[in-house]
Image (cartoon, rainbow, N blue to C red):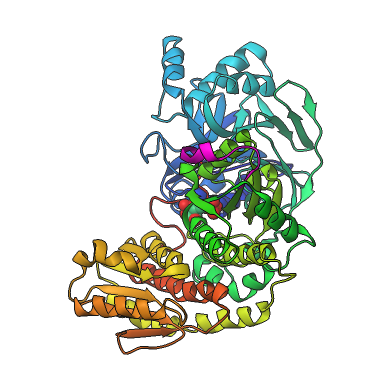
Amino acid sequence: MCGIIGCVAEEPVAGILLEGLRRVEYRGYDSAGMATISGARLRVKKGAGRVVEIEERLGLSSLKGNIGIAHTRWATHGGVSDKNAHPHASCRESVAVIHNGIIENYLPLKKALTSKGHRFKSETDTEVIAHLIEAEYARVKDPLKATSAATKKLKGQYAIAVMFQDRPDVIVGARKDAPLIVGVGDGKMFLASDVLAFIEHTDRTIFLENFEVVELTRNGAKIVGPNGKEVRRKPTQVAWELSDISKTDYAHYTLKEINEQPQTVVGASVQEAGRVAEFAKMVKRAKSLFITASGTSYHAGLLMKFRLNKEAGLRCDVVVAGELREHAGFLGKGAAVVVLSQSGETADVMEAVKIAKKSGAKILSIVNAAGSSLARESDVVLLLNCGPEVGVAATKSFTAQVVVANLVVDAVLGKKRTNGFKELGEAVRVALETEKQILGLVKSYWDRPDFYFVARGYESPVAMEGALKLKELSYVHAEGMPASELKHGTLALIEKGTPVVVINPSGDAHADSLSSAEELKARGAEVIGVSDTNDSVYKHFVQVPKVQAKFMPIVEVIPLQLLAYHFAVARRNDPDYPRNLAKSVTVK
Ligand code: G6P
């Protein structure tokens, strides 16, 4: 949520910042802005809209100076408007701040500052930070100390970058419960919420911890811990490369990422020696076992639970991360929490981790971003290895999660290794060939107001994921549920022509799902079957290859991802940047 980038260099930075903004735009895209210092003047340009529109309107890239900060916003406090866009400047416009997070006590702070004569220009919580730092800076005359003193007064979550008009050599950053990292380049230093912001310039990164404050000059970074003492931390090299984040020939990142899945399902299967066994051992030993995640990752968690319950005989609960607090009574020493997250930064997820850790539970994570907060807070980490996922809607990270979850379950079951990834990669490639047929479905159904997805047993989460993808990308109302639940309410909504996708692989639940399909058809629904085997009940049939039962969700979800993507395109939505959403939701 909200993208931050700052850069101090030996050369003009506006172009570097603009490129960085484009790369972190997936974190929020309702407004954007930039501030630089040149000729002892701090200049700010900002406005509502996408980065490309603001660049066209205001010419962010024309800002002069070798130091600057820039921001893309996902609005929390204060509507989407030019004046609420970041950066925010203090009264005398001598301090500029960008912020990701929420300042929970901003109202009392604002009141106190107003009574001291500070005048506010926006409705945001962020602006109080600029005024607080300005006041502290007047007192201590030191950027790092002033920022440190100001942040001590903040309650909530923040990652901030700050510039001072009379210090054109310094950017200060601070974080609590929101991501902020340093990029160490040659003659340039970066501060950003995500490595993607500066990967073009450097892959050397320093991850900041909560309550640390950093002072960045073009020659280095000085990090100070909450006790005021300097912290020395060496940069680590991140594995992602620039080529991973280009769209290549695809119209959208989402389509590119859907098409990467024949490789990513194989990549996810390669884990560090012994790591899966260690993870599985802790799962088996846990006195009480939870799985937690948000959004799409939650659906992968549901799949994992199914096999752990049914095949391994392990009792475990899957809880959406934002609700784990309600289950805290069953956490504690001896408990283990499996946490799934693409970004490793989702605020609900990190809050769940905090609650679990506080209780003494172990954290076992399945995560894509290696240096993320989640990875760093975990006892054991398995990586998705699927490269950066830029499209806001999760696609390849979901199938990678299903692969890794299956590695763990197989290890819990005592299997020495999981086989069949080459065949799985090939099957995914075949599943992608359903695209032509999907385009036909889009032509028939793109203007329908409602869509339903149903399945039974292990495939039920696939139905939920199909509905979630369609909602996110096309803005069409969609529901996904176990087919058995239809008759308990949803059947009342089925009319002549209502499209219903039935995910129904051959196997135990096949006959029951066919009965559900018949019941739907009898009430006028147009049933779209997604299966390895056809049946006359389906008006349309999307054939997916037959793979091992545990991997069927992977091949079944591919046509559903394509359906959502092409729906979005047909409805003239931008599939990479769905309205009101953001990829990395770092606010609660
Ligand atoms: C956001 C994204 C979803 C994603 C969810 C969880 O809502 O839009 O696509 O599934 O966050 O993200 P995570 O990074 O924790 O997997």
Residue segment shown in magenta: 325-336
Residue drawn at (52%, 84%) of the image: 545
Residue 125 image point, x, y percent: 45, 29
Q: Can you tell which quarter of the image residue 470 is in?
A: bottom left
Q: Is residue 182 magenta?
A: no
Residue for point 65% across, 42% down: 334
Tell me what residue is drawn at x 64 percent, y 51 percent: 365
**Residue, far front:** 313
In the figure, is residue 554 to the left or right of 190? left
Q: Is residue 577 visible?
A: yes
Above-or-below relation of 335 to 134: below
Looking at this view, is 448 or 145 the one in front?
A: 448
Instruction: State the residue in front, 505 or 334.
Output: 334
In the rendered image of this protein, does residue 91 appear above or below residue 35? above
Depth check, front residue: 351 or 442: 351
Judge whether residue 65 can be spotted in this image. no
Query: Is 577 left, or right, of 515 in this rendering?
Result: right
Please state the horizontal and vertical placement of residue 294, each as a whole percent of the image.
49, 51
Please say if 239 is above or below 73.
below
**Location of residue 502 (image quadrant):** bottom left
**Which quadrant of the figure has residue 439?**
bottom left
Q: At which x and y percent is residue 555?
A: 52, 76
- The relative height of residue 202 versus residue 362 in the rendered view (above or below) is below
